[in-house]
Image (cartoon, helix red, strand yellow):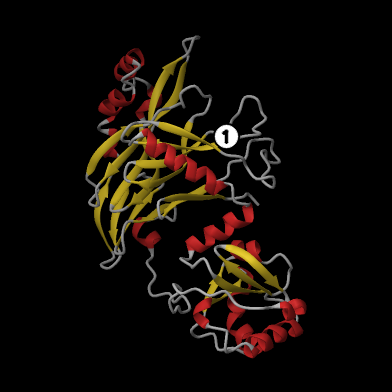
Amino acid sequence: MSKKYFAFLLIFFITSFSLTAKEKNITCFIKKYNLPENLNILSVFGEDCVNCYYGFSHFLKEHAADFKKEDFIFLFQNSAENEIDNIFKFRLGFEKSGYKIIVDDEFYSCLNKNGVTTLSIIEKAKVTERFISKDIYKFKSFARSDTFSSVKEFIKLDTINLMGRFGTKKLAVTLLNESKIIVQNKYTNDVFLYDLNTKQIIKKLPISTFTESYDSLLTLLLLNDPENLDYNLKNYKKKEFYKSFPLCSVQEVYCFGNLVYLCLSVAQMDVDTNNHIVHRSQLAIVKLDSNLQIRTIYKIPERIPDSDKLLNFFDCIFISEETAVVSLSVFDPSGLRKKDSICALYSMATNEIKILNLSYESFMPLRGNNGYFNYYHFDVWNENNVIKGCLQSIE
């Protein structure tokens, strides 16, 4: 990947993160639920008074000519989920059939700041107007979207008991395509290709596949440190600690296109200045095809050149087959973190890393109550060749 392309991605990524926190959150939920940028959302408070319910019911019926189901969403808190039918029938006076209904606490709190039922008009992923019952008289028009196809209430078509099939709920599940998922058992570290239609395991990739290749993995990852490589290859089988220690583990599993990526941690030993053995790990990304056949293993640099930042796999999100945005360590020796680097653009094709120098928003405390640095997960995506992203706040 060329440096010019990296610069292009970097500019757009930083531009995207300059949005306000509120806009970022709305953008995230629009992406999450595949919504248009122009829409109308009634965030319904499950414990609202009858007058407020009636006010909005009257308002919506009064604007029936302008009010289109395909442009409208009813948003509820999780606590109201079991009462939605009653709220529609006895409070709003609507038949809920045909409306899009979303139950999501975070989405709700992103839009509803008033503690009462609120109508939000959203255009180009921004709230342009917000009304509660007492000021609905100021309303002018609904947002329109030509791309918002007719939608219906989400219906649960099927349920698959993955715990019964894999023996634990400690599973990481990633969608490969419309009919197949990748399942990782967090206890055994085994990875499975699972068919949603037949409800059968197609293939299992045991962690032993990598453990049995431990010598060759270390050779790849420690190529620039021949002394340490030689020490590990000669001694790891003799050390009591390593006889039961997981030499390889899968940290995260991701899918992009029809490819599968395993974020792999490979154990190693270091000898410090006092001749003590220090246990560390090297990072690698394993690219597999849609049948879990290994295609390439990439060595991930441990440290950013000319920086005290370390790469980690808290987040690793692919934006192309050869490019990922990877999270960085939150530790800063200065303790200031006024301008923090939370992630970097990493090219597997060239092994280049470009730090994305981004600031946390003011409402994001840098340290928790325990005194440790907070880590904020992020999400990124490519939208019409523009890289966009958002941070996730800690409650």
- Which residue lies at the image location 31% right of the left edge and 60% below the top edge? 177
The extreme top residue here reads 274
x and y, in percent, of residue 84 in the image? 59, 80
Task: Say if 137 sits above or below 32 in the image.
Answer: below
Residue 258 in view in this figure: yes
x and y, in percent, of residue 49 in the image? 75, 81
Q: Nearer the viewer, residue 7 or 36?
A: 7
The residue pinned by badge 1 equals 330
Q: Amino acid at mark 1?
A: Val
Q: How many marks?
A: 1
x and y, in percent, of residue 361 in the image? 65, 45
Residue 91 in view in this figure: no
Q: Nearer the viewer, residue 377 or 291?
A: 377
Task: Say if 386 sits above or below 63 in the image.
Answer: above
x and y, in percent, of residue 362 in the image? 69, 45
Q: Nearer the viewer, residue 148 or 269?
A: 148
- Which residue lies at the image location 53% right of the left edge and 33% below the top edge? 329
